[in-house]
Amino acid sequence: MKLLEGKNVIITGASRGIGKGIAQIFGKHGANVAFTYSSSEGPALELEKEISDMGVKAKAYKSNAASFAESEELVKQVLEDFDGTIDVLINNAGITKDKLLMRMGEEDFDKVIEINLKSVFNMTKAVQRTMLKQRQGSIINMSSVVGVKGNAGQTNYAASKAGMIGFTKSVALELGSRNIRCNAIAPGFIETEMTDKLDEKTVQGWRDAIPLKRGGSPEDVANACLFLASDLSAYVTGQVLNVDGGMLT
Ligand code: NAP
């Protein structure tokens, strides 16, 4: 059964990792997929082709999610390219700049907040009018267990991800009466390029401490997004869904 047949979806940061996994699963479920990247043009164009070959519409856009103006321009372009409707927005683009607070510079803090948190404001503002007109929409924000629990060495990242949760709940309250839902996903340790930077010993220690005894895959997160994007979750809004193998339990 295809759960997203004919739905138009925007995913930020889908040239690799979790965003790419979401784009692939959504394409398989019949969604038309518009997605962004920051600099990985080659992988983005490959993914565009891979998803188009599934028989749905797919298009890659180079757009900096931290820029308000670029986000507005992106949504304008997607509306032109995808017949004027946007059913689902996934705010997935994100970066880390990990350092102990003692060593963290102002730029390390500002950059992470701009790309991870302000981007969510930019993109939600940009799709809001369209979703209000449609009287339906699902917005999914990619937070993190670190935003729920905190993490030493990630004050900037944890603040951005906790901020996304407050934003998510507020949007759910503001837009619920118009049938626009907004939820957050808090992935635990998902094995992507973002986590490839970590040393293998630390990573094995994390795997051992997770109740399900493994790191997650982009597909694990994508399947949770599929639920929140589809009508299966029609009565779910303002929630944070941990996809963490039981890490926070
Ligand atoms: P990733 O492999 O590093 O991929 C990040 C994606 O975001 C790439 O497509 C990148 O594009 C894009 N991007 C970066 N800056 C951008 C910008 N300014 N504007 C638009 N796109 C931008 O990361 P990931 O591990 O898949 O993580 C995806 C999301 O899940 C992030 O929000 C992350 O915080 C969250 N998350 C990840 C984990 C984990 O364990 N991996 C856990 C919890 C939460 P380019 O390829 O062009 O650079």
Image: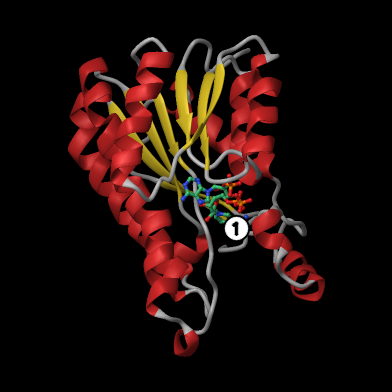
Residue 200 vs 47, above or below: the answer is: below
Q: Residue at x 60, y 58 (%)?
A: 188
State the image quarter where residue 195 is shown: bottom right
Q: Nearer the viewer, residue 210 or 111?
A: 111
- Asked which colour scheme the image uses, the reply is secondary structure
Up-down relation of residue 155 to residue 64 (above or below):
below
Q: Quadrant of the C terminus?
A: bottom right
Q: Secondary structure at mark 1?
A: loop
Q: Residue at x 77, y 59 (%)?
A: 213
Most foreground residue, 118 or 190 = 118
Q: Residue 99 location, x and y as percent?
A: 53, 80
Q: Which residue is mark 1?
A: 188
Label 1 CB-ligand 1 distance < 8 A = yes
Q: Name the spot of residue 88 as percent of width and height, x first.
A: 41, 27
Q: Indicate the amino acid at tag 1.
A: Gly
Which residue shows up at 21% across the image and 23% down it? Answer: 132
The residue drawn where x is 45% and y is 85% is: 101
Decide if residue 41 is on the left or right side of residue 8. right
In the rendering, at what x and y percent does residue 69 appear?
29, 41
The answer to whether one can see residue 102 in this image is yes
Question: Visible in this render: residue 86?
Answer: no
Q: Position of residue 18 (x, y in %)?
A: 62, 44
Looking at the image, residue 33 lies above or below residue 139: above
Residue 225 placement, left or right of 16: left
